[in-house]
């Protein structure tokens, strides 16, 4: 009985998980702020750097706060989350593609 209870409680959200997620999120936010404030990179690399930091922060927050992982229980939450990311990516890239084509066709 105790083994099942320990196994069940291992997937619960814990304070250390929240604290690690919070600390890493603060560090990533300060890194992005530092990149912009001190202009360490050129504009094109700055956009890439901030985007990478945002993606890393999304992953950290998903793992620490939402507890999305590859466990059998976490997988049921992970698949809808990945599907949502796919739909958002398709919508955003399609919108950017349409705006680029509109801009090109209006200027030429």
Image (cartoon, rainbow, N blue to C red):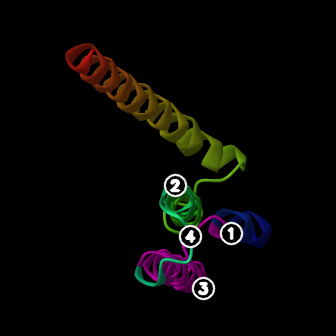
How far from the left and from the top, in percent, is residue 72?
A: 70, 44
Q: Mark 1 points at which residue?
A: 10
Judged from this view, the residue extending furthest toward the left is: 106
The residue at the point 27 percent across, 14 percent down is 108
Question: Going from the N terminus, do you reach mark 3 or mark 1 first?
Answer: 1
Q: In screen coordinates, is 82 left or right of 87?
A: right
How far from the left and from the top, in percent, is residue 12?
A: 57, 68
Is the Cβ of the residue at disc 4 closer than 8 Å to that at disc 3?
Answer: no
Q: Nearer the viewer, residue 60 or 72?
A: 60
Q: Nearer the viewer, residue 68 or 36?
A: 36
The residue at the point 58 percent across, 58 percent down is 52
Assign a secondary structure to mark 1.
Answer: loop
Judged from this view, the residue extending furthest toward the right is: 3
Q: Mark 2 points at which residue?
A: 44
91 to 31, vertically: above or below: above
Foreground: disc 3 or disc 1:
3
Which span is picked out in magenta?
9-36
Q: Mark 4 points at which residue?
A: 41
| Residues at marks 3 and 1, CA–CA distance in whole angstroms | 13 Å
Assign a secondary structure to mark 4.
Answer: loop
Question: Main SS of the magenta segment?
Answer: helix
């Amino acid at each position: 009985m105790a083994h099942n209870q320990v196994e069940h409680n291992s997937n619960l959200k814990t304070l250390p998980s929240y604290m690690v997620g919070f600390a890493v999120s603060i560090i990533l936010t300060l890194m992005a702020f530092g990149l912009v404030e001190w202009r360490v990179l050129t504009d094109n690399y700055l956009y890439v750097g901030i985007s990478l930091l945002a993606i890393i922060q999304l992953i950290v927050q998903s793992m620490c706060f939402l507890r999305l992982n590859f466990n059998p229980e976490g997988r049921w939450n992970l698949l809808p989350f990945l599907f949502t990311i796919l739909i958002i990516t398709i919508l955003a890239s399609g919108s950017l593609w349409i705006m680029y084509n509109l801009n090109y066709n209006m200027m030429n």
